[in-house]
Amino acid sequence: MPQLIFKTDLQYFGSIHFVKTLMENRNVVFDIEAPFTKMSFKNRMVIVTSQGPLMLTIPIVGGRDQKTPIKDITIAYDAPWNAQHLKSIITSYKRAPYFEYYEQSLHTLYSNKPEKLVDFLFQCSDWLQSQLKIKWDLSLPHDQVHLDEVIKYHDPWVPKNYNQHNGLPKYQQVFSDQLDFLQNASILDMLFCVGGREISKLWAPPIK
């Protein structure tokens, strides 16, 4: 019986539901030929601030309306978006119980300035795997995989509806004394509030 492989988009750190899907399946191929689509999590993530949800967007050259394959999308550095994203993350999560364990490596990650969006997304994916102590397949074997072995997975939760997902566990968010719980934010929110070890216990399949 052929091994099933999930073929899906790359996301900027990904929503909690998206990363849960990756962790539970592991055999994942990221589709770098997929066209860039506006209002997706390919270059966006949602963090939780004292004012509520904040969308962080990586600017791209040519604007968001293009249909270029994501592998060819170039990051725009007209403004220091990476420093701004890091500052927003630190401001929002410096009180989170596990944030100190990840802060230094985040500084290193956001000091990088890759030309292509896909390169930065792979760096984010590598960083996340390191913190969760889990490995999913990052190869791109389009020519090696038989079509009957591939499940094309399209995450239904996008920026316009991500917070409507209500099947995920609740946990104490940083500003829970001020705000209602925000469902399905970026995995970073759960990582900083709960810790990578606890997330792995929830969703990592047993090693066979």
Image: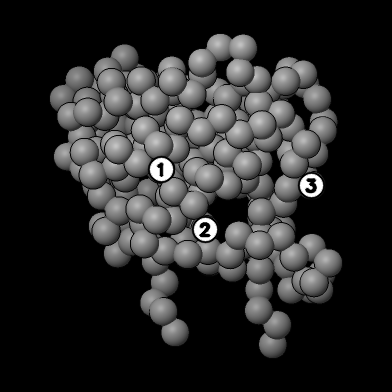
- Tag shown at residue 187: 1
Q: Is residue 185 visible?
A: yes
What residue is shown at x 60% (from left), y 60% (from top)? 138
For mark 1, give the secondary structure: helix
For mark 2, give the secondary structure: helix
208 left or right, relative to 33: left
| Residue contact at pointers 3 and 1, CB within 8 angstroms | no
* Picture coordinates of residue 159, whole percent (x, y): 56, 29
Read off the residue under disc 3: 33
* Image quarter (top left, top right, bottom left or bottom right) of the N terminus: bottom right
- Mark 2 or 1 closer to N-term? 2
In this rendering, which labeled residue sits more in front, label 2 or label 3? 3
For mark 3, give the secondary structure: loop
* Picture coordinates of residue 125, whole percent (x, y): 51, 49
Front residue of 90/175: it is 90
Q: Residue furthest top?
A: 79
Disc 3 residue type (three-letter): Glu
- Mark 3 or 1 closer to N-term? 3
